[in-house]
Amino acid sequence: MPDFIPFEIIEGDYDGGMVLLADHAMNRLPPSYGSLGLPESAFRRHIAFDIGVEALTRQLAARLNVPAVLGCFSRLLIDPNRGEDDPTLIMKISDGAVIPGNYPISDEESQRRLDTYHRPYHRAVERTLAKAGASGRAPLVLSLHSFTPAWKGVPRPWHAAVLWDTDHRAVAPLLEDLRRDPALLIGDNEPYDGALRGDTLYRHCMTSGTPHALLEVRQDLIADEPGIAEWADRLAPIFSRLNEDASLHEYRVFPSRTGPYPGQDAPSEHA
């Protein structure tokens, strides 16, 4: 039995039509890596994980009775939401923090982290989506992340944001529902763009035509139990309404703004 499992699958109703993903749910490292040379305080920061997302995902999965896949390793080890050839896959420095255990790093060690942590996580996502789509009905995939209240001294005013590439099917109704609350400022591809070649949703949803959206919640809003409960209360009925839309259970490939998919000479015509 390995001493570190790189993913956790929360079981749910695989025929229910929805799967939740939380790439950066945890700040853990395998024991053999120690702390990568960082102080303990680094693992309470956003550089190590998406604050609040693990508990929020668990609450939503339980309320909606849907399966979820959680990443169990810190993104300081290797980032599951990056393509295998992405230069930020294993960060040497993150928001001013030099990561001694990642610099220098050998090709052998990079490959070991891919084989032992990154790829098993993505195989778990693949298995979960295949099980949820076994009937031929596409599952709706909702990926949960969180972002810092400020970046390099600049405040981020959004309470939450939806990130996406070109598949707008789940995005438009999700934005509309979130914006019904006049107290919330909801970003559309803020504070960064959702088109990232090789990331989790590109790999598992864009290339297959699986309907999806990525929701980012500002970290200070889900940093404690009351905040997490408030957002679970808010999101559970919204996600449930999305899941009732038959058009969000059809496979349809959209072209990516990052360029043609591997093996394609041109983007899909199904825009």
Image (cartoon, rainbow, N blue to C red):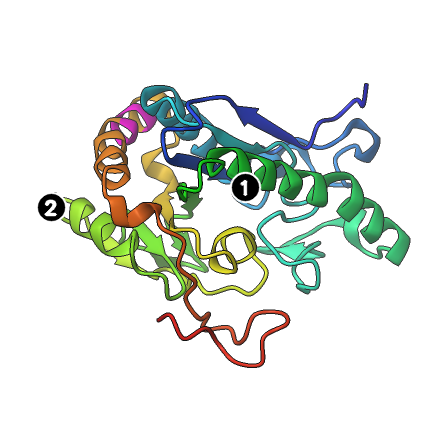
Q: Which mark is residue 87?
A: none
Q: Residue at x 62, y 36 (%)?
A: 124
- Residue placed most toward the observer, 95 or 251: 251
What predominant SS class does the magenta segment belong to? helix
Q: Earlier in the sequence, mark 2 or mark 1?
A: 1
Q: Residue at x 68, y 32 (%)?
A: 6
Residue 13, horizontal then vertical, whole percent: 41, 23
214 in relation to 265, above or below: above
Q: Which residue is mark 2?
A: 180
- Residue placed most toward the observer, 169 or 236: 169
**Could you tell me how far apart the alpha carbons at marks 2 and 1 are, in whole angstroms?**
28 Å
189 in relation to 34, above or below: below
Residue 133, horizontal then vertical, whole percent: 47, 39
Q: Amino acid at mark 1?
A: Asp
Disc 2 crowd, CA 10 A, few/some/many (<14, 14-19, 20+): few
Residue 114, horizontal then vertical, whole percent: 76, 48
Which contiguous range is marked in magenta?
Answer: 228-232
Q: Amino acid at mark 2?
A: Arg
* Element under disc 1: loop
Check the image and name the residue furthest to the bottom: 265
Q: Is residue 261 magenta?
A: no
Can the viewer see residue 239?
yes
Q: Which residue is mark 1?
A: 23
- Residue placed most toward the observer, 104 or 260: 260
